[in-house]
Amino acid sequence: MILKPARLLTALIAIAAAPAFAQNVATVNGKAIPASRLEAVVKQVSAQSKQPDSPQLRDAIKKDLIAREVMVQEADKQGYSNKPDVKQALENTRQSIVINAMLADYVKKNPVKDAEIKAEYDKAKAANGDKEYHARHILVATEKEATDIIAKLKGGAKFEELAKQSKDTGSAANGGDLDWASPANFVKPFSDAMVALKDGQITEKPVQSQYGYHVIRLEGSRAAKFPAMEEVKGQIEQGLTQRKIAAYRDELVKKAKIQ
């Protein structure tokens, strides 16, 4: 089939115009909304809401982009973009976007290595120890109060009842119960006194810490349960990544000329 000159000219014009038209999803008062913006929003919404990419989703997002463009044009017309508080908010958002992009690239170029994760896991496991303890305690403000409580316990008073007067409100309602935990979870004076006890034994003297005076009863002890590295690998990697970012930030601040 051979096109006549007029039809050929029309076809060529259509072909030339098609790519430029395909780059935009709509034009609002002469301002184009690029297709790349639609694609980015579709990808973001699909990832966040788990909605599959579909014509319905794209149509809804397209309508929203058009409405947003109409509204932002009206806001600009009314001068809101020039308001000091709006300018400050825009600058804060700009900084966040730029910083996050830089840090994402930094993390990509400086990933946490498996050896680092293993070292951090071993360190945490060693700090946790090979035993965990189930203890109760009563925390009071003065040594005399703690001594009086110990005397009452020796006289037959119930630990759970006396624990109601504990300054540690988190455990007081549960009879002073601290559940199973590693000694590393407690301040040193407390953990040292706790591990020295036998099952069912109460401290003979008040145990002083920065929080006050403790009376401790050991309910029991057992071999420590520590999660396998694969179970916590993601958490460790995330923590190490945050450390890298913090160190990078501190390094940049240190190098900066601040007056």
Image: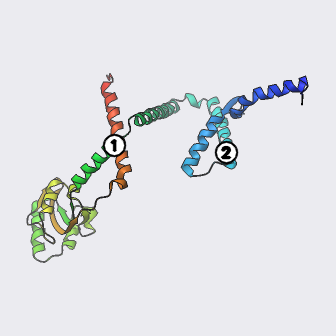
Disc 1 to disc 2: CB gap under 8 Å: no
Neighbor class of circle 1 (other Cα within 10 Å; few <14, some 14-19, many 20+) is: some
In percent of the image, x 21 and y 59: which residue is there?
Answer: 130
Image location of residue 138, percent across then percent down: 19, 65
Q: Amino acid at mark 1?
A: Leu
- Mark 1 or 2: in front is 1
Q: Secondary structure at mark 1?
A: helix
Q: Please indicate whether residue 56 sits to the left or right of residue 101 in the image.
A: right
Q: Is residue 41 left or right of residue 98?
A: right
Q: Which mark is residue 58?
A: 2
- From the top left corner, tell me how far across and down residue 71 is, in percent: 65, 37
Q: Where residue 54 sits in the image (x, y, percent)?
A: 67, 49
The image quarter containing residue 163 is bottom left
Q: Give the distance between the C-alpha atoms of the residues marked 1 and 2, in whole angstroms.
A: 38 Å
Task: Please provide percent x and percent y for residue 145.
Answer: 12, 64
Whether residue 136 appears in this view of the structure is yes
Residue 19 or residue 188, whichever sits in front: 19
Q: Amino acid at mark 2?
A: Arg
Q: Residue furthest right?
A: 4
**In which quadrant is the N terminus drawn?**
top right
Left or right: 160 in relation to 258: left
Label for residue 73? Answer: none
In the image, what residue occupies the spot 57% across and 30% down?
A: 81
Residue identifier under label 1: 240
Work out which quarter of the rendered image holds the C terminus and state it.
top left
Residue drawn at point x = 14 percent, y = 56 percent: 189
